[in-house]
Image (tube, rainbow, N blue to C red):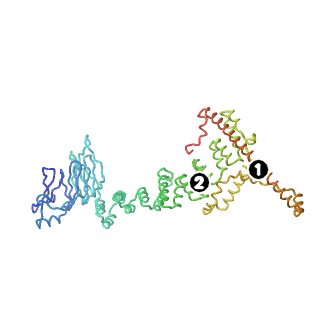
Amino acid sequence: GHMLGVKGSDSAVLFYDFDSGEFIRKIDVNCKEVYWSDAGNMVLLVSDESSYVLSYNEQVAANAIATGQISAEDGIDGTFDLLYEISDTITSGKWVGDCFLYVNNTGRLNYSVGGKIETLVHLETSSGGSTTHSILGYLAKEDRVYLIDKSLNVTSYKVMLAVLQYQTAVMRGDFDSANELLPSIPESSYTSVARFLESQGFKEEALAVTTDPDHKFDLSLELGQTSVAHALLMETPEEDKDTTDTMAKWKRLSDSALKDTNLELCEAASIASNDFPGLLLLYSATGNLEGMEQLATLAQDGGKTNVAFIAHLLTGDVEACADLLIASKRLPEAAFFARTYLPSRIDEIVTMWKEDLASVSETAAKALATPQEQPAMFADLDIALQVQQMFVQQRESTKSSGGIPASDYLTAKDDLNLNLIELVKAKTGGAPPPPPAGEEKMMDVDDGTDDAAAAAAAAAAAAAAEAEAARVAEEARLAAEAAAAEEARLAAEAEAAAAAAPKDDFDADDFGEDW
């Protein structure tokens, strides 16, 4: 090599200057082989399990020799510095510029640039798994490395010198030289070059170099360039648009766009990836009524019944909620839903439930009550129908006006706590009935003659109205309690009948994994 090396008895190697014979430095490594680079500025020391790449400062050594500042024990300080370690067992190797080509003990032909190891090829090994090849040399004009095995067979592999020089320039931080070398590298090697750049932390440069669409997509998301990632996905071939990999990419793009608060791109990516839960979150957070209605249709067509149900419910489309429950064979849930939100369809849905339940238990089916057959068990049903009509009118009015703006939240939120049935009952039962037309005329005539009698009559009417309202309220409370008790009894009987039935009979009624 460029210096005289002497292996010491204490697991160290000592370097001496060839010309002057002066002691340069002692390196505490149990060294088996020493490989000097052609320029003499780097040296690799091979030990049993790992190797060490050191830089050599020839100028420091020359100045110390000229001035005689050499320590007899330590040599010249600052001549060698550790650059990096190769955690591999090297059997043979060759420097090509600042890159080191080598064969390891498991039969891999690798090269190392700045501590980054790339595998070129897996060589044939012996029956014990050890390598049988050694490196003869590298011909730059052929871009090939030559090896020989124990049977004296010579083989060669292509190793682009331009790639090695490019990576060396990158490791030195000399991107001007690297850019000059890039055109001499075949485009087929651009992706491997880009992955090297990525491993060194130069992701923007890697994005500009790589030709692999998948690699470019990953880099664009890591760099936050969602527009580039979106453009790449839009170029997806027609036959690959519905693949799992493409759907996963759209989902990743949606998440990245959401982080950047690019809601328009987030929505488009979520629709493309059928990310119905993500759209539900987006539309509910932004108050997008039209989007929520479209989501209900998309989710229902896509088999995501749970998302479709929630979307219908958030838009106030209780009729669609009931239809969805019926279509999914969830008739008990549909009946209770109608009892709460859609009283006009209680008879229809409970009748369907009874017909379905009759195939399992006639007794349980007959125990179910309907407003048409047992009107006494459905207290205030007429008032509930009025409330439903008021709700539908208010819903259509709100939709036609474009929805309730967020600025009205402070006043609109109180409407959520209104008990509409109690309000209707108070409105219809709490005020005294209007007087007949004849009496009203007589009161107008006598208004100025008997004020005391009129006041007394008004007070008596008010007291009677108040007593009547109290009586109606008490009757309603008792009726509600009776209805609740009856519903609980019927539900218990239905559950007992369902539990006694064979499990397979109910499989067809399952709402699926989404419920």
Q: Give whichever of discs 1 and 2 has the lower sequence position.
A: 2
| Mark 1 residue element | helix
Q: Nearest the camera: 206 or 345?
A: 345
How far across and how far down the image is residue 90, in percent? 23, 50
Q: Is residue 138 above or below residue 490?
A: below
- The amino acid type found where label 2 is placed reads Leu
Q: Nearest the camera: 467 or 77?
A: 467
| Mark 2 residue element | helix
Q: Identify the residue shown where x is 59% and y is 37%.
A: 507
Q: Identify the residue shown where x is 16% and y is 52%.
A: 12
- The amino acid type found where label 1 is placed reads Ala
The quadrant of the picture occupied by the N terminus is bottom left
Q: Nearest the camera: 98 or 307?
A: 307
The image's mark for residue 295 is 2
The image's mark for residue 469 is 1
How far across and how far down the image is residue 463, in percent? 79, 52
The quadrant of the picture occupied by the C terminus is top right
- Viewer-nearest of labels 1 and 2? 1
Q: Is residue 381 left or right of residue 106?
A: right
